[in-house]
Amino acid sequence: MTVIVGILCIDGVVIGADSSATSCSGNIPIIEQKTKKIDVFDENCTIMAGTGQVGLRQRFYDIIKSTNKTEIINCFKPIQVGALFSRKAKLDFSNTFTEHGQFGALMAFPYKGKGYLCEFSITDFQPELRTGLQCFASMGSGQQITDPFLALFKKIFWKDDELPRLQDGVFATVWALNHAIDVNPGGIKEPINVATLIFEGDTPKVSELSEEEIMEHVSNLDNFMGYMKEYKTRQQDPAQATELPQVEE
């Protein structure tokens, strides 16, 4: 059981995940344990979160870690970067006769001064880049919760072809994960982990948000939800309305 979320932003990429891992015997859940689902690779400024077989995730981790920046730069287009990792992974997985549908992933990577978000479908591990029209992706058992939530969030806060700011993307990611943790039927739990890819000039930088930074967004979320709950009061008596809380930079 898992849920991972990625959002392409105008100034970077954000990827977030819950921290629950479920061990099963066949289709029967046996135990649930805390785990970390996001990996940050300083060597090639890449972020990865996966869903599915843990062993395949470990192998994909090694593939990303062993891929140097030159291999990425030598690709002619960003989608070919996704194809590079897809090809390497599928070749590795085929060595142990892995069937399709066992593992999927989200990856953030830099390419010629821009950040990109790539989804590797759990169906066949084919790469798909996210764009302004479809700037978010989620995967895992919680996808049916997070996809509609993010679509509503986008409709309210972003224009159809507009990318959000990174700060807004982090806020949306934290909110979506919190929502999934609150309402899921089992197997998706705290704590939330979030990592970002940003650029300092032309230099890409990847990092994980600290617990304190995530809690700042949770606090903003609580304030914002409190404001929304006052909607009926504001309609009846505008004088009692409070100002809309601002997302902190």
Image: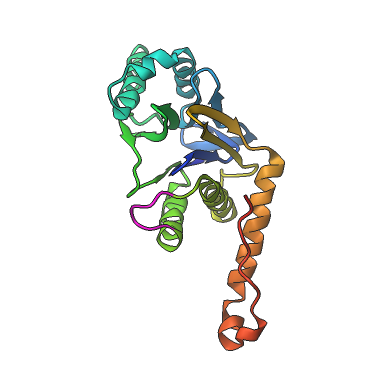
- Please give the name of the residue rendered at 65% of the width and 45% of the height, measured from the top-left corner: 214
- Please give the name of the residue rendered at 64% of the width and 34% of the height, measured from the top-left corner: 33
Please identify the residue farthest to the right as the structure is shown. Answer: 212
* Magenta segment boundaries in residue numbering: 158-163
Rendering coords of residue 246 (x, y %) = 61, 60
Rendering coords of residue 15 (x, y %) = 51, 38
Rendering coords of residue 60 (x, y %) = 45, 20
Q: Quadrant of residue 129?
A: top left
Q: Quadrant of residue 205?
A: top right
Compared with 45, 169 (above or below) is below
Rendering coords of residue 24 (x, y %) = 52, 33
**Residue 215 in sight:** yes
**In-image side of 80 versus 59 (left or right):** left
Compared with 101, 3 (above or below) is below
**Residue 93 in sight:** no
The overriding secondary structure of the stretch rendered in magenta is loop
Compared with 200, 192 (above or below) is below
Q: Nearer the viewer, residue 223 or 60?
A: 223
Compared with 59, 37 (above or below) is below
**In-image side of 58 versus 88 (left or right):** right
Q: How many marks?
A: 0
Q: Quadrant of residue 74?
A: top left
Q: How is the image coloured?
A: rainbow
Q: Nearer the viewer, residue 190 or 163?
A: 163
Q: Is residue 36 magenta?
A: no
Please identify the residue farthest to the bottom as the structure is shown. Answer: 236
